[in-house]
Image (cartoon, rainbow, N blue to C red):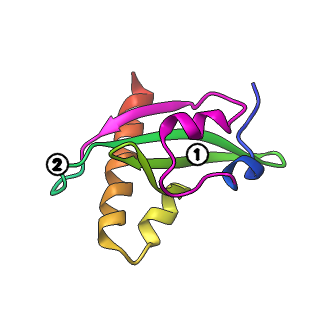
Amino acid sequence: CMSYSFKEADLISKGMTPTMVLAVSRDQPTVDVPFIVKGHETSDYRVIVYRLALASNTSDFYIIFENDKVIYWGHPYEFKRHPDQTLNDIGKAAYEAVQVSKKK
């Protein structure tokens, strides 16, 4: 099993569709789930998670879609520290959905 790399992460851009993201990835995501953001129920959200590798370290790397377009990507903590409260809320909801998905 390969891990997602920074080279692949550098290919992600805002507005990409899930199909486009999967096409530039050499590995399958570890999680791919829809989720709901409180206060933003009119939008469809989805998170794709890869295991990002750097030397012997790996971590979750999130790619968030709103209405099938990439809006933000990074590690879970990056959503928490972003100055935009909406992205904080999206990151929190995505993290919770990923945790529930991992327990299944």
Secondary structure category for the residue under label 2 = loop
Q: Is residue 44 magenta?
A: no
Q: Amino acid at mark 2?
A: Glu
* Residue at point 30%, 60% (across, down): 89
Determine which of the numbered discs, if any, sits on residue 41 in the image. 2
Q: Which residues lie in the magenta part?
A: 11-36
Secondary structure category for the residue under label 1 = strand
**x, y (%) of residue 14?**
51, 58
**x, y (%) of residue 77?**
50, 62
* Residue at the far top in the pictured view: 104
* Residue at point 43%, 42% (across, down): 47
Residue 23's image quarter? Answer: top right
* Residue at point 77%, 51% (across, down): 7
Per the image, the residue denoted by label 1 is 60
**x, y (%) of residue 97?**
35, 39
Q: Quadrant of the C terminus?
A: top left
Q: Depth check: give the residue in front, 90 or 16.
A: 16
Q: Is residue 23 magenta?
A: yes
